[in-house]
Image (tube, helix red, strand yellow):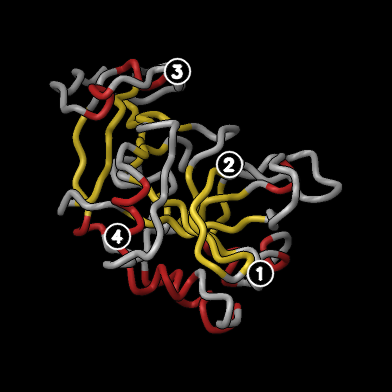
Amino acid sequence: MCGRIVQKSGPLDYVERIFPNPRRVFDDPAGPRYNIPPGTRPMAMHRLAGDFELERLPWGWRPHNSKYLMSNARLDKILANAWPWKLLTAHGRILVPADGWYEWKALGDGAKVPKQPYYIHAADGGPLFFAGLSNWRPGAEKDETHGFAIVTNDAAGGMVDVHDRRPVALPPDLALQWIDPDLTAMQVVPLLSQGLPEAAFTWNPVRQEVGNSKYQLPDAIEPVPPMASA
């Protein structure tokens, strides 16, 4: 699953990537975050009320009458118009801006072998825009029933672990279309198959401390020598 993301850039850095001349100043007093897990409130972009907004929304959605908190939305299920994602594709499309995400690669066979964490980011160093789906609407509580899930491409696998799920990162032009309220689900859902290719990314091993989501130091994303295989 896509279970840890990085938002180290400022709000304006994300906004200017898709709006070269923004007419508003966006501020976020929380500052950079280097290790964001589900259950927290990352920055999200949306037009759920028409105008473009950037605010913190809860990562993780619990559908009505479900006991599961969903932090990822599988691309194949969305393309098949399957429950529960078909409930959100018409009016719940958002973007999750990020600088990268983490994956863990097992260093051998077996359930208890050590895993090497990797930080994955854009090869050009720019911000990314993950497609997301949310049940939140303006005025609603920011809780699990109104949270969001990041769209993941399970069929493509992870960047360093074939069994992982990579988030669907859209190029800026398609990202804007994804959250356009004037476009229908039928028009924009196919865009999810046009996410950035693997060649658009690079990755490096990082320190074991990122396994603890409380580790928020800037060196979380800095390259370290890889661990030896078991």
Classed neighbour count for the residue bearing mark 1: other residues with Cα under 10 Å, few (<14), some (14–19), many (≥20): many
Query: In front of the other: label 4 or label 3?
Result: 4
Q: Which residue is mark 1?
A: 91
- In three-dimensional space, the C-alpha distance between marks 4 and 3, rounded to whole angstroms, equals 29 Å
Q: Residue at x 57, y 54 (%)?
A: 73
Q: Is residue 123 depicted above or below 195 in this figure?
A: above
Residue 144 visible in the shown view: yes
- Disc 4 on helix, strand or loop? helix
Amino acid type indicated by mark 1: His
Relative image position of residue 136 (x, y in whole percent): 68, 54
Q: Which residue is mark 4?
A: 16
Amino acid type indicated by mark 2: Trp
Q: Which residue is mark 3?
A: 214
125 with respect to 26 (left or right): left
Q: Which residue is mark 2?
A: 59
Instruction: Return the disc, 1 or 4, that comes first in the chain's sequence.
Output: 4
Q: Residue at x 56, y 33 (%)?
A: 40
Instruction: Return the disc, 1 or 3, that comes first in the chain's sequence.
Output: 1
Amino acid type indicated by mark 3: Lys
Classed neighbour count for the residue bearing mark 3: other residues with Cα under 10 Å, few (<14), some (14–19), many (≥20): few
Instruction: Return the disc, 3 or 2, that comes first in the chain's sequence.
Output: 2
Quarter of the image where one finds residue 8? top left
Classed neighbour count for the residue bearing mark 4: other residues with Cα under 10 Å, few (<14), some (14–19), many (≥20): few
Relative image position of residue 153 (x, y in whole percent): 45, 57
- In three-dimensional space, the C-alpha distance between marks 2 and 4, rounded to whole angstroms, equals 23 Å
Give the camera-side residue of 212 and 142.
142
- Disc 3 on helix, strand or loop? loop
154 with respect to 161 (left or right): right
